[in-house]
Image (cartoon, rainbow, N blue to C red):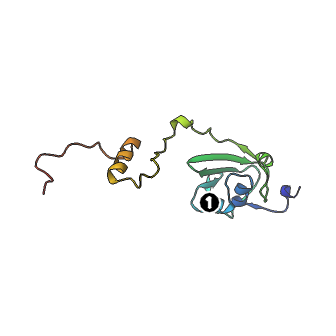
Amino acid sequence: MAADAADEGPVRVDAWIWSVRLTKTRSQAATACRAGHVRVNGDRVKPAHAIRPGDQVRVFLAGRERIVVVLKLIRKRVGAPVAVQCYEDKSPPPPPRELTAPVAVRDRGTGRPTKRDRRELERLQGLGGPPRTPEAPGGRGR
C-alpha cells in the first residue's frame, strides 16, 4: 500500500495530523500549528516539523484536546479504519453533553437582538457583570 511508505523520509506534522483525520483540512492543521495548538513531545512546533513513530502529539481544536501517540507514519489521507491504526489515542473523554452550555436560539424572523436582549443572554450564560440594580435616587448623576 502506497500510504504506508514510511521509509521514504520524514513526515510533516501538519500532513500527518490531516492524514489521520484529526483535522478536516491540511490548511486547518497548518493553522493550528502556527497558532501554537499543536505540541509534539511537549514542545510547540511549526507545520514543517518532522515526526517519528513514538512521538506524542497534542492537538487542541474546537475546545477539546486530543492526545495521540504516533504508531505509523503516513503522508496521504486514508479512510477512518486505516487512520485509527496509525495512532494510539490517549485523549481524555469528551465532556458529557449535559455539561456543555446550551446555545441560545432566537425565533425566526425576530431580527437582531437589542442591547437589552444581549445583556439578558449574557446574564443567563453567566458572562455578564454584576446583576442589575435599580437606579440610585437622583437620576443619572450628572
Give the residue furthest to the right.
Answer: 1
Taking 69 as reference, is 33 above or below it? Answer: below
Report which quarter residue 27 is drawn in.
Answer: bottom right
- Residue depicted at 60% across the width and 39% down the height: 94
Can you give x and y, in whole percent of width and height, for residue 25 in the image? 68, 59
Q: Quick one: quadrant of the N terminus?
A: bottom right
Residue that lies at the very extreme toward the front in this rendered image: 109
All told, the count of numbered labels is: 1
Where residue 28 appears, x then y in whole percent?
63, 60
Callout 1 secondary element:
helix
Question: Percent x, y for residue 5?
Answer: 85, 58
Residue drawn at x 20%, y 43% is 134
Q: Looking at the image, which is closer to me, 117 or 139?
A: 117
Q: Nearer the viewer, residue 28 or 11?
A: 28
**Above or below: residue 48 compared with residue 113:** below
Q: Name the residue at the left extreme.
A: 138
Among the 4 quarters of the image, the one containing residue 47? bottom right
The one of 31 and 7 positioned closer to us in this rendering = 31
Front residue of this view, candidates 97 and 121:
121
Across and down, in percent, residue 42 comes to 62, 51
Q: Is residue 25 left or right of residue 107?
A: right
Query: Residue at coordinates 35% horizontally, 53% vertically from top-left?
Result: 114
Task: Answer left or right for 64 relative to 110.
Answer: right
Q: Which residue is mark 1?
A: 33
Residue at screen point 67% across, 55% down = 24
Of the residues shown, which amino acid type is indicated by label 1? Cys
* Quarter containing the C terminus: bottom left
- Alpha-carbon neighbours of circle 1 within 10 Å: few (<14), some, or many (≥20)? many
